Image (spheres, rainbow, N blue to C red):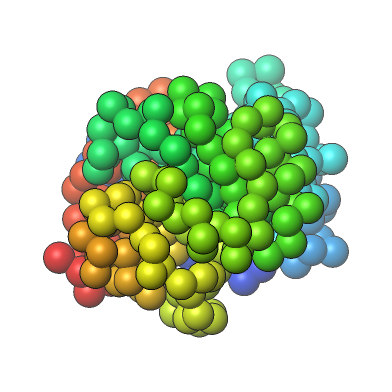
Amino acid sequence: MKKWFAVIGDPIAQSKSPEMHMAWYEEANVDATYIPVHVKPENLEEAVASLKLLGASGWNVTIPHKQTIIPFLDELDELADKMGAVNTVVRTSEGKLKGYNTDGPGFVRSLEDVIGETQRDEPILLIGAGGAARGIAFALQMAGYCHISIANRTVEKARNIIDELGMGQALSMKEAEQQLESFKIFIQTTPAGMSTGNFDLPFSLEKFPKGAIAADIVYNPLMTPFLHAAQAKDATIVNGLGMFVHQGAIAYQHWLQSYPNTNVMIARLTKQLGGN
């Protein structure tokens, strides 16, 4: 029987997930389809019940439903439970709905696509302390990274994550700016630099160490102001497109028990977004 999957969110028209998953199904000769479903916040419970009733094998969850969907699921995996957020739902063989979060693991895979697995002992600075930073921090820790600090305008938010991690330090943006030379990997997790957002840098990169690694979770534009500034300091650059592709690939693996071709997809979407 043909399987079908979906992505739910509000808005949803801009999502590239349907195009990505449909290309993977075609490439692997999988008899499945993937559709975008526009779900308003007030209709979320009804939408989850409908997806289950209509036989969806699973679906992705995007803004603003990643936290609010949790009460309507039967169980969560460890990372989703720690994060308090879900971006992938799997319908199990028993018919239950299990929530996962593939964003953080997707970021780690995209980072290691570029830098390999040999730098897990290097000091990391996460910039921002929102949901994305939280997921990436826990995923990094689970992958074996052991020196993680977080800078945020509201230091208390950073401290809350650091306390749960049991490592690193919580810094103000000013403190981070003064200590930049003590870090090797920088991960920008705020919306700064999005094509529709604020283009201000979180802090001056005057003390940014030459030859460091700079990653941004934003993928449109591919080169954010943060990445441009870091590149001028001879940084190794990791844009946000790999995270987007790998989080989708991990969801695909949860649903279909195989890992799709991420390299071809990253190249395809890079070209669409004007990169090379």
Q: Residue at x 46, y 72 (%)?
A: 204
* Rendered image quadrant of residue 75: top right
Task: Locate residue 30 relative to residue 90 in the image: left or right.
Answer: left
Q: Which residue is the extreme one toward the top?
A: 94
Task: Identify which residue, 250 or 95, lies in the foreground.
Answer: 250
Q: Check the image and report above or below for 263 versus 1.
A: below
Is the C terminus in the top left, top right, bottom left or bottom right quadrant?
bottom left
Q: How many marks?
A: 0
Q: Would residue 58 appear left or right of 131 to someone viewing this image?
A: left
Residue 7, image x, y percentages: 56, 53
Residue at left 46%, top 23%? 144
Task: Indicate the position of residue 242 as horizontal and vertical percent values.
Answer: 34, 50
Q: Residue furthest left?
A: 276
Compared with 76, 206 (above or below) is below
Q: 47 or 252: which is nearer to us? A: 252
In the image: residue 198, left or right of residue 20: right
Residue 243 visible within the image? no
Q: Is residue 193 in view?
A: yes
Which percent across, then down, holds residue 118?
28, 27
Q: Residue at x 30, y 28 (%)?
A: 117
Residue 261: horizontal and vertical position, in percent? 25, 39
Q: Residue at x 32, y 50 (%)?
A: 213
